[in-house]
Amino acid sequence: MRASIRGVRFRRVDRAQWIVALLVLSLIAAACSSSEPAATTTTVAPTSPATTTPPETSVATTTTSVATTTTVAPGLIGALPQCEDAAVIPASIDDGQVSFIAGGTVYVADADGTNVQCVTQASSDEPFLWGPAADRLVAGDAVITEDAATPAPTTAMQTWSRPTGKALVWVDGGRLLKSNIVDIQARDLTFLARHDAVTYHPAGVEIATTGEADDGTRGVWLASNEGGDPRLIVRAEEAIVHDFTFTHDGQSAFFLAEHDDEWHVHDIFLVLPEGDPEANEFDATIRYSSAGPLSHLVVSPWDWMWAAQDRTCGSGARVVIGDTVVPLELAEVETYPVGWLPGPRLVVAAYGDGCDGVQDLWVLDVGFDGASSATLLVSGVAGAAVRAAVPDPPPPLGDVSTDAFTW
C-alpha cells in the first residue's frame, strides 16, 4: 500500500552527490488511506553548518510472505558453564551471536548453540545492549569493554554511537544527553521542548530524534551528532512517530506511526535510490497496518528487513516480519523480536507463561526464496540481545539541497 504525498516531486538525485531529500511528512490518517486525499509536504532548508563530532573510525528487499517450519527441541543450549566474577568480552564472530541473561549471568552463544561463554554478572531487569563493533556492552550500571568496566552514565536506556561505539546518547526526562565512555560526563544536547527517543545514523556524524518543538510541532529531526543544525524531516500532525530507525545504507528509514485507531509500519526515502524510476515521486510506503499497538521495531543492519511486535504482551503479542508471522508452533505463546543477525536471521523471544516470566529464545532463518525455519536455542532466560559487528559505515547524509525539489 502506498500513500502518495502530493505537491512535491523530485528530480533524480545522483547517488555520487549524496544529496539528501529531507521531507516533512504530514502523518494524518487520511494520508495513509488510498481512498482519502493525500497530505502535502513542506521542506525545511538548512540554516547553518552542522556542529559535528568527527566520525568514528570504522572497524571491521522487500520482505515476502514465507512458508515456515519449526524444529522443536529442548533447546540447542543445554547446561550453561559456571562463571567467574570478572567481566570478560569474548572474541566475536562474523556471523554474530545471541546474548542472554540466565542465573544472574550474561552469556553469549553462537546461533547454532555452540561456543557458549560467560561475559559478566547481571541482574535480570537491567539495560542490556551490545555496541556496534560487538566489543563493548552496557549491562545495568556498568559499561564493559575489553579493557575495563566503568560506571554507566545513566539508568535510562542508551543508544551507542556509530560505527564503533565511542559514546552513548540517550533521552532522560525529555532532555537529549550524551557521554563518551571514558569520562562518563553527560553533555546536554537538547534542542527541542521535549525529546522522546534518539538514534544514530550508521555513518556516525548525524542523529535523528523524535519529539516536540517549542512551537508544538511534532515529528522527527535530523541533527549533527552533537545536536547542531537540527532540521525537521518528518512532521507528525495527527500521528505519533515511534522507533525511527535508519536502514543499513543510511538512505532511508523505517518507523512506526500511531494513529487514533490504526498503527502503521512506514518507510521513507531520505536519498533517492539510483536506477529506480519509481522513486521520482516520494511515496510514504505502508509496509504493515494493524489495530496495534505496534512496538519493538528492529531493522536489519545488513538487509532491508524489519520485524515488530503487534499488540501488547498479555493481549496476544506476536512477531510480524513484513506480512509474515512467526511459525504456527509459536502462535499460542506471546513473542517479540530481539534483533537481527546476518543471514538474515531473526532472534525472537517467547513467553511461555506470562510476560513477567522467563523467556525462550528462537532463531528464525528468514529466507528470500519463500521458505524459513525456526529453531529453539535456549529456554528459561531473563533477557536477551543480539551481538554482531555492524558493516562498514555508508557515507553520511550530508547537506540539504533545495535543488532536489520542484514545486
Image (cartoon, rainbow, N blue to C red):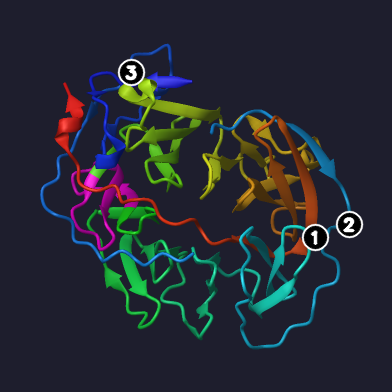
Q: Is 28 located above or below residue 82 in the figure?
A: above
The local secondary structure at tag 1 comes to strand
Identity of the amino acid at label 1? Ser
**Which of the labelled discs sits on residue 379, or is there none?**
1
Q: Which range of residues does the magenta coloring cover? A: 208-231
Quarter placement of the C terminus? top left
Question: Quadrant of residue 380 in the image?
Answer: bottom right
Give left or right: position of 72 versus 150.
right
Identify residue for label 2: 74
Instruction: Determine contact: label 2, label 1, CB under 8 Å.
Output: yes
**Which of the labelled discs sits on residue 38, or is there none?**
3
Identity of the amino acid at label 3? Ala
Q: Residue at x 30, y 33 (%)?
A: 237
Q: Residue at x 55, y 38 (%)?
A: 293
The x, y position of residue 164, in whole percent, is: 43, 66
The x, y position of residue 175, in whole percent, is: 31, 62
Can you tell which of label 3 and label 2 is closer to the viewer? 2
Asked whether residue 301 appears in the rendered view, the answer is yes
Sequence-first disc among 2 and 1: 2
Sequence-first disc among 1 and 3: 3
Q: Residue at x 33, y 14 (%)?
A: 37
